[in-house]
Amino acid sequence: MVRVRFAPSPTGHLHVGALRTALFNWLFARHHQGVFVLRIEDTDVARSSEEMSQSIMEALRWVGLDWDEGPIYQSQRFDIYRKAARSLVEKGLAYYCFCTPEEIEKRRQETQAKGGHWKYDRHCLNLPESQKKELLEKGVPAAIRFLVPEGVTGFEDLVHGHISVENKNLEDFVLLRSDGFPTYHLSVVVDDIETKITHVIRGDDHISNTPKQILLYRAFEAPVPQFAHLPLILGPDRKKLSKRHGDTSVLNFRDKGYLPLAFFNFMAQLSWSPGPEDKVYSIEEMVREFSLDRISKGSPVFDLAKLEWLNSKLINEMPLSELIEQLRPWLEKEGLWSEELIKEKKIWFEHLVELVRSRSRTLVDLVEMIAPFISDKVKYDPEAVKKHLLDPKLGQLLPKLKEDFIQLVQFTAQETEKVLRERAEKEGVKAALLIHSLRVLLLGKAVSPGIFEVLELMGKEKTLARMDNLPEARKTLEFIKDIEKSGEVKDEQQK
Ligand code: GLU
């Protein structure tokens, strides 16, 4: 039975690098109908917080990663780690170390001054038994160090192939610090043994930890799991992905309006793909196809353009009812939701979402495009006003066009287009002048789906009311009055 774990340290929000680790563990577990364990590595009590643990779990849930066991909090297991470390001392596989950091630092500098390479010099391993006993009895603070045996430690990494180190290059690392807190190596191995982890899948920044941990498994006489180390994610500049490349926390992508499935695909496709990359795969397809041996060794580049592409592809491909379900909390947040959108106004609303989805990369884009159709208020983009609403002819033209619209019995895309073009011809102006100005007046911005479809969906009443908004829209330009006074309106418009 496959058993894997995701073991984040709750010292910050879940970031994309850690999420990819979680995601591959989850896919692997689900593919093999195994168990996915969540473990919170909060042994660094000062830097960890429950708030961050909750935030990490919220991010996992958002992406759709559920866990079968846990969360196991390491901070509740200190006694277990202490007991485990002492058991190794009893077996002669670890030893007490009384050296203070200052003493170690002094000897390190002396060794390096002589051109030597420092690793812990086993000073305390070689103390006479009687002296060790005395120090312990006196209660002198003591760490416990692992006694690294001679030989070579190797393993078959499921991504990188064979990796080995000579043990002489490893230091007798600390298992339990003199303040009684376990180190990462101790707690991670004790827990992986206890939860019977079969595969450790984690970032390749942990490769150098693996030989030490393998030695610990052997010391505890426990089966050694298999290891798969995932390549580091790079930013577009090919440097390690970090805050410099923008907010890399997972919840930030939720808040920007990405869909969980698009984000899941994007993260998975950073190092693996179930097939051609020009597709959004369902979770079931990814679970079915997942295998560790298809993970690429090379470092993937975090390319936001790809995420946007996947997201807009999914927005356009998913069933309308599902998209509306996803949109609902967003519209609620903006005070734009009402039940009639899925009842009395269902057909109209579906038509609207259908119309704007092809122009949306995110749910935020969608909400922005939908808002003017639902809300009574329009937010005018000053750039759009400046570009399309400053022509002095509009003051005369729009009321005439409004009259034409009032006459219409059928306020359809076809009919409105017909009268608008006729009006433009009669007045000797380009239809584009009317089209652009209508678009800005109705929606507040300079881009939208075809204006005549917009008119039909907006409806006669709202359209006519908004056609009176010219003065209000122009007010968004603070400098409008000065421009009008100095007669520069035309120049502005021609720019
Ligand atoms: N807590 C470790 C980290 O966040 C993970 C340890 C592990 O996976 O072995 O990097």
Image (spheres, rainbow, N blue to C red):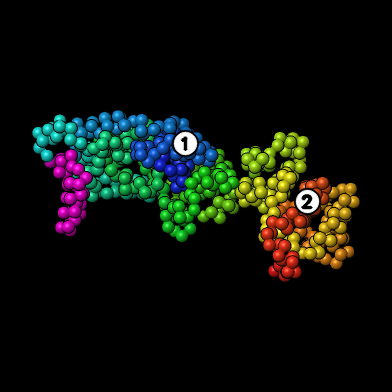
Residue 317 visible to an observer of this rendering? no
Picture quadrant of residue 404: bottom right
Q: Earlier in the sequence, mark 2 or mark 1?
A: 1
Residue 229 lies left or right of residue 396; in this view the side is left
Residue at which label 1 appears:
54
What type is the residue that disc 1 sits on? Gln
> In the rendered image, which quarter is residue 158 located in?
top left
Q: Quadrant of ligand 1?
A: top left
The answer to if 116 sits in the magenta stretch is yes
Q: In the image, what residue occupies the spot 23% across and 32% down?
A: 86
Q: Residues within 10 Å of mark 1 (few under 14, many from 20)?
A: few
Circle 2 Cα neighbour tier, 10 Å, few/some/many (<14 / 14–19 / ≥20): many
Residue annotated with mark 2: 466
Q: Position of residue 38 (x, y in %)?
A: 43, 35
Mark 2–mark 1 CB contact (< 8 Å): no
Q: Secondary structure at mark 2?
A: helix
Residue 430 image point, x, y percent = 81, 65
- The magenta segment is 98-126
Front one among 243 and 156: 243
Which numbered disc covers residue 397? none
User: Residue 219, position in %: x, y?
Assistant: 25, 36
